[in-house]
Each structure stands twice: as C-alpha cells, then as structure tokens.
Image (cartoon, rainbow, N blue to C red):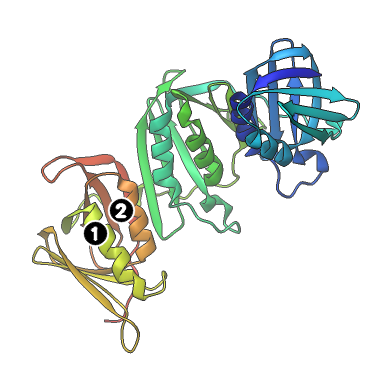
Amino acid sequence: MKFIVEQSALVDGVNWVSRSLSTRPIKTELLGIVINATSDAVYLSASDLETASKSHFQAEVKEPGKVLVPGKLLAEISRSLPNKPITFALDGTRVLVTSGSAKFTLPTLSVDEYPNLPELPDTTGTLPSDVFATAVSQVAIAAGRDDSLPTLTGVHVEINEETVTLAATDRYRLAVREIQWDPTTPNVSTSALLRARTIADAAKSLTGTKTVSISFAPTTSNDRLAGFAGDGKTMTSRMLDGTFPPYRHLLPQEVTSTALIEVATLLDSVRRVALVTDKTVPLRLDFNNNTLSLEAGAGEEAQATEAIEILLTGEPISIAFNPVFLADGLTAVGTKFVQISFTGPNKPAILMGKSDKDGALVENYRYLLMPMRYAS
C-alpha cells in the first residue's frame, strides 16, 4: 500500500472516524483505524461496536492495500503535520508516514481480526445540516446522564411524513423540537431512540456539509440501526432499547399567566443570583406587577436578590427552578425574548422563544421545566 494525500483531507477524514474509536475496547483491534487504499480513493473506518464511522478522500494511490493502525496516534500525527502532501507506505508490518522532513513509523494491528462494519441503511430523508444541528442541540441538553436509565439518555426521533420531532428528557425537564425535512418516501412514519451524545456529535460535525441524510433501518430489520451521512462521511449507530416515555400530555394547552422577558437580561440575572448557592439549590422567582424578583440563599448562608422588568400577563406567581436547568433552557430558545408560561406554582412551566416583543411565538421549540420545592 502506498498513497499521497493532502494534509487537510487526511485530518478531516481521520477526525471524523476517530470519534467512533473505542475507549474501553473488548479487543485490541477496536483501538485502530482501518485504512483501505483503492485505485482512486482512500477509505477510513473505525468502530466501538455501538457506532461506526466511515469517510473517504481522493488521493494519489500508487499501490492499493488495506491496513489497521492505532487510531489515536494516527489522529495526533495527522494534526501535527504541516499543510503539505503526506505519503503513506506499507513496509512489512509497519506504515511509514512522511511529510517533508518529518517521518513517522506506525505499527499495524491485525486487519483480518477487525469486525465487519454495518452498511448505512437506505436514506429515509434529508434536511439542511445547520437546521439539524441546531435542533439536536436544543433537545440534547435535556437528555439524562445516568446510564442506569438508558432510555432517558437518548433523543427520541419521530418521523411523520414531512415533520421530524425530536424530544429528550431527564425527568426534571423536557425539550421538544419540530423540524421540516424532505422524506424519500411519501407518508413515511417511524421512530427511533438514539444516544444523545452520538446524535449531537454527528449533527455538530456534519455542519460543514450542506445537507444531512438520515437513515433508519426498517422496523422489520434485526440491526436496529440509524445512520447519518454528508459529504463523504457516514456514521451508523445502534438504537437504544426501551420505550421513550409518552410526553405530549405534559405540554399544557391552557395557562394561567405568562411572562415575556429579554433572554440576555434574565440569563445574566439567573447566573449572578445563583452564585451564592449550590447548583441543585432552588432559585426562587416571584412574578408580580411586571417585575421579576430573583432570590437565592437563606438564613445564615450567603444570599442574593435581583429584580428585572418583565411583561406579565395573568396572575402573579411565585415558583422555584433549578438554576442550571433554567439557564440551559434560556440558552436553547435561541431568540431575543422568551415567554414563560405557567399553570401553577407546583406545575411545570414552558419556555418558548420570541424574536421580538410583538412578534409571534416560535412554536417549533418547547422547553418544559419542573419546579422545585422550597421553604418559604
């Protein structure tokens, strides 16, 4: 095997596949990246048996061949080399990497022992990469981090014809985002539960492409695979087992009061006032007379208060939230203003965005936040 490739193309390809390298492999070969040089292109692949990433790039291939090299070392070397052509050459059981006067020798692993990687399922639909990345980031923040509850560590993806609904929850908050896309099959209807870390990483990394293709294996398939593709890069991921909890009934249809607030102002106040307490201690909020009073701390402990102007419609209300979760929701709405809707002090509130005070609500994103109990 021997080929010559531009450094930028190599780094782009290696960075993509290295995200699927195993950190705790059950076999040594899963620490490696497969390099497969064909007559006119070079294909890279890596897997941790849960996800599999592939990429390819054009190269001047002198001799076709296939090898398996340590993935982390290959990634570090490729990033460190200057922006010059790089030559890869197999010499016995080692790979020689040369760029200008820089030379590296990489050991090889047994490529014959490397597992067969799954193929990308047929494309289910496509959508703009930036829209996908934004939507995923808005919901992934609400996914759980507790691996003992794997169902809650995922993002639920529901497809109904031209609408994709993403949802995630950790039981204390729920984020739901709807986006429009271009399905390959009319009247398509399916759903999947994917690891939040995996789908967030794929969505963010594919923003350099114009569109993203999403693929779901048929429900009759034993593979239970989802896939993402764009600009010569693909990733497949096994779906999570279990059923995502029903959530639509949690989204209130009627409210008793709403507060319209500038996001930046509220976010700054939340972060300031919360400085005096632990992140799990309730942040108390009192909405009254077009003023929001924020308060944290009590007794002999450090305390903080602050008041900001708001536009309150409906009944006054006092409520408490986890300050970190509230800040996450304010950041996620992505608009200048946020409308917080209430149905009671002990019931969830809903955050929705508004581009301006007199504009319409951005109804494609909802962030539901459970209140916390606090001593009066």
- Residue drawn at x 41%, y 46% is 139
Q: Is residue 364 left or right of residue 242?
A: left
Quadrant of the drawing holding the N terminus: top right
User: Tag 1's secondary structure?
Assistant: helix
Along the line of sight, which residue is nearer the eye, 276 or 224? 276
User: Residue 134, how many percent across, how many down?
Assistant: 39, 38
User: Residue 309, how many percent across, how many down?
Assistant: 13, 61
User: Please, what is the three-letter code of the amino acid marked with disc 2?
Assistant: Leu
User: Tag 2's secondary structure?
Assistant: helix
* Distance (Cα) linking label 2 and label 1: 8 Å
Along the line of sight, which residue is nearer the eye, 255 or 231? 231
Viewer can see residue 52: no
- Residue drawn at x 39%, y 57% is 173
- Residue drawn at x 44%, y 59% is 171
User: Please, what is the three-letter code of the amino acid marked with disc 1?
Assistant: Leu
Q: Is residue 6 left or right of residue 312?
A: right
The image quadrant of residue 47 is: top right
Please report contact status of discs 2 and 1: CB closer than 8 Å, yes or no.
yes
The label on residue 330 is 2
Residue 36 versus residue 62 in the image, above or below: below
The image quadrant of residue 313 is: bottom left
| The residue positioned farthest toward the bottom in the image shown | 300
Viewer can see residue 298: yes
The label on residue 266 is 1
Mark 1 or mark 2, which is nearer the start of the sequence?
Answer: 1
User: Residue 154, how many percent across, how many down?
Assistant: 52, 47
Q: Classify mark 2: residues with Cα within 10 Å, few (<14), some (14-19) or many (20+).
A: many
Q: Classify mark 1: residues with Cα within 10 Å, few (<14), some (14-19) or many (20+).
A: many
Residue 107 versus residue 268 in the image, above or below: above
The label on residue 60 is none
| The residue positioned farthest toward the left in the image shown | 289
- Residue drawn at x 81%, y 27% is 67
